[in-house]
Amino acid sequence: MPDSREASIERKALSGGRLTQAEVAFLLTDADLHWLGGLAHEIRTKLHGDSTYVVANRHINYTNICQNRCLFCSFSADATDDDAYFFQPDEIVQSLKAEGAEDVREFHIVGAIPPRELAEYAYFRGILAALRAAFPEAQLKAFTAVEIAWIAQLAGKSVRETLADLKSAGLDAMPGGGAEVFAEEVRSRICPDKISGDEWLSVHRTAHELGIPTNATMLYGHVETPNQKAEHLLKLYDLQEETGGFQAFIPLAYHPVGNRLGGEFTTGVEDLRHVAASRVALHNFPHIKAYWVEYGLKLAQVMLFWGADDADGTVGRELIYHAAGAGAPKGVTIGELAGIIRGAGLKPIMRDALYRDMREYEPVGEDAQEV
Ligand code: SF4
């Protein structure tokens, strides 16, 4: 029998009630792992049955040149570094055409904060316009709140005006990066030059008001405390209650290689706990992702029974987690992703960036691989 704290959490999570910060912190620390996983799976199943979502997508990291240089980041570079790069919109399109990206349904476009002398507003708008023209069937999920805040500064416009203009150029949705952990004590230690947590939330609120759906993330496993993570999740819960504009939450496990923060990799058990706790605390979010790039395909498969209903996508050429030590492949086929879902006894559902146009995956030729 669950004790009274667990019974209270179950009651709220299954009937649409807001958990307290202490309850969410309990999920993240001391809650029995099997009980937590069972509750997370119950919520996932209530929302989606055995449907598990995948998308044919490509990551586009247009530049790694960044003036913020967050301590936890292994991807960014200074303009003078040997590994610094900066792709123009036509280079991005040519490269995608060369690799045959015509079947892609979602471009996930995330870069850095290049200094003013390298990029002006027209550059960012140009990326969207070029991709929209070259791949009219694909949706553009572009620019974290951190990038949007910077792009607005470059444009000399408000965030609202900037988002409206980017939407007219092709912006369909926004990714959830840059959230890290909202607490100022954490941000001042790991990303002191990044926008505040409140600013991150404000950009997403504005996007939702303009009809631009977004995702949300939380980077865990560095200097944060359970209470700070609980507060972070509840701020997301509250904004979702207000706007309903979030599509998916993606827990992001900190990777310690190649940056100035250092530290340890998270364990598989910690990862399972964070996915399951997210599903329970954010029961008003439609989707929780098991982002296989950070966890590897096999742990991501297990997470489909710990609250996750979305295995993300084929990705193509992931750079950010791999710079930080990820051991997963840089990309997979849709058949491989569908294979881990079917291998778990679940049903792979192909989606687009807006979770529309959904249909069950049917293997075609050599795409029908299983792992
Ligand atoms: S996390 Fe983003 S803003 Fe921070 S250094 Fe890396 S690319 Fe720049």
Image (cartoon, rainbow, N blue to C red):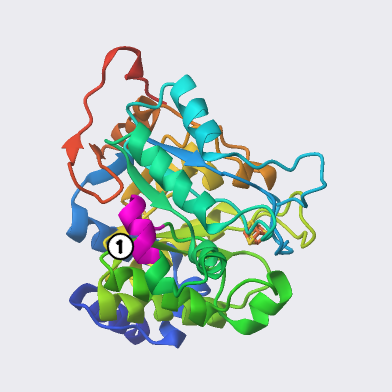
Amino acid type of the residue that numbered disc 1 sits on in the rendered structure: Ile
Vertical side of 302 occupied by 245: above or below? below
The residue tagged 1 is 212
Residue depicted at x 66% and y 48%: 64
Vertical side of 31 occupied by 131: above or below? above
Q: Where does ligand 1 appear, by image quarter?
A: bottom right
x and y, in percent, of residue 22 in the image: 46, 87
Question: Is 183 on the left-hand or right-hand side of 336?
Answer: right
Vertical side of 180 occupied by 141: above or below? above
Quadrant position of residue 20 = bottom left
Q: Furthest residue to the top?
A: 365
Magenta region includes residue 171 = yes
Question: Is 209 on the left-hand or right-hand side of 21?
Answer: left
- SS for dot 1: loop
x and y, in percent, of residue 208 in the image: 30, 70
- Return the residue nearer the eye: 169 or 7: 169
Neighbor class of circle 1 (other Cα within 10 Å; few <14, some 14-19, many 20+) is many
Report the number of numbered marks: 1
Q: Is mark 1 within 8 Å of ligand 1?
A: no
Question: Is 366 on the left-hand or right-hand side of 193?
Answer: left
Q: Quadrant of the C terminus?
A: top left
x and y, in percent, of residue 31 in the image: 45, 73
- Return the residue nearer the eye: 175 or 254: 175
Q: Which range is magenta?
A: 163-174
* Residue 42 visible somewhere in the drawing: yes
Q: Quadrant of the N terminus?
A: bottom left
* Residue 171 visible somewhere in the drawing: no
Residue depicted at x 17% and y 36%: 359
x and y, in percent, of residue 318 in the image: 56, 39
Residue depicted at x 38% and y 70%: 161
- Return the residue nearer the eye: 70 or 181: 70
